[in-house]
Image (cartoon, grey):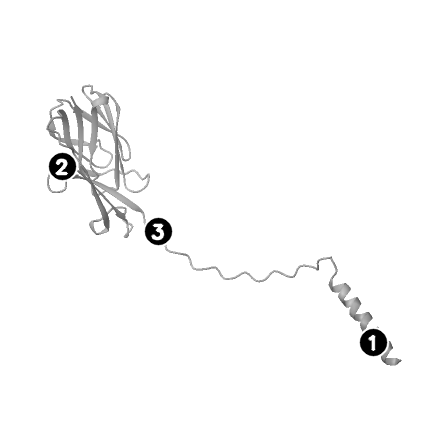
Amino acid sequence: MRITWLLRIAFSLLFTTAFIGCSPEDGADGLNGTNGIDGIDGSNGYNGLIKTLVEQPGDNCSNGGFSLQSGLDSNANGTLDANEVTSTEYLCNGDNADITYKSYVALLSQSGTENPSSVVLENTLDLGINWIRESQGKYVGTLDKDITIGKTVIFYTTPTTHTGVRGEIISDNQVRIELQNGTNAFMDNFTNLSFELRQYE
């Protein structure tokens, strides 16, 4: 009799425990654990650079043209050094035997806040260009005669002291060049930048 009574109490406790354990109410959240230790910062990536150079007539371009060198600035000096060049592509002039044009070719140099100076190498266009420094790394050349925009192209090279050059014809008597040493970092002081206006007939 006593055993039956004890079994009833045990079953009653077991039922109550199971009922409480299956309660639909959530218990209180536990405390947040301690934050882990931050990982070590990774190394900064390298900037990719492109350099444009005049390619003289030869094995790479029979009629001359331009070489486009690219690579990573592994020493972070803002210049694509010879040992950093990983790819070279050539933009060659076509066979121009049947295409006639006149050109203005000059070497431009600039220092400090002075206006660029030029040494004219060829001038079958018979024009003059007066260069003015607009601001750091930005220069406008005013022509003393009009050109035909739709038949004229502009060529230029990147000095070894800079990472890039942009050039454009902005009107029938004005051109602009901008020199950079880094992304949107315009910079003065360059020597012997090759500049050409070529007007096809």
- Of labels 1 and 2, earlier in sequence is 1
Query: What residue is at 54 percent from the left and 60 percent from the top?
Result: 35
Q: Nearer the viewer, mark 3 or mark 2?
A: 2
Sequence-first disc among 3 and 1: 1
Q: Residue at position x 23%, y 42% from top? A: 51
Left or right of residue 102: residue 165? right
- The CA distance from mark 3 to mark 2 is 35 Å
Question: Which image quadrant: the N terminus?
Answer: bottom right
Confirm whether residue 156 shows in the render: yes
Q: Which residue is mark 3?
A: 45
Report the label total.
3
Label 1: few (<14), some (14–19) or many (≥20) C-alpha neighbours in 10 Å:
few
Q: Residue furthest bottom?
A: 2
Judging depth in this view, the residue of 127 and 139 nearest the camera is 127
List the residue tagged with mark 2: 64
Which is nearer the eye, 34 or 148?
148
Q: Quadrant of residue 18?
A: bottom right
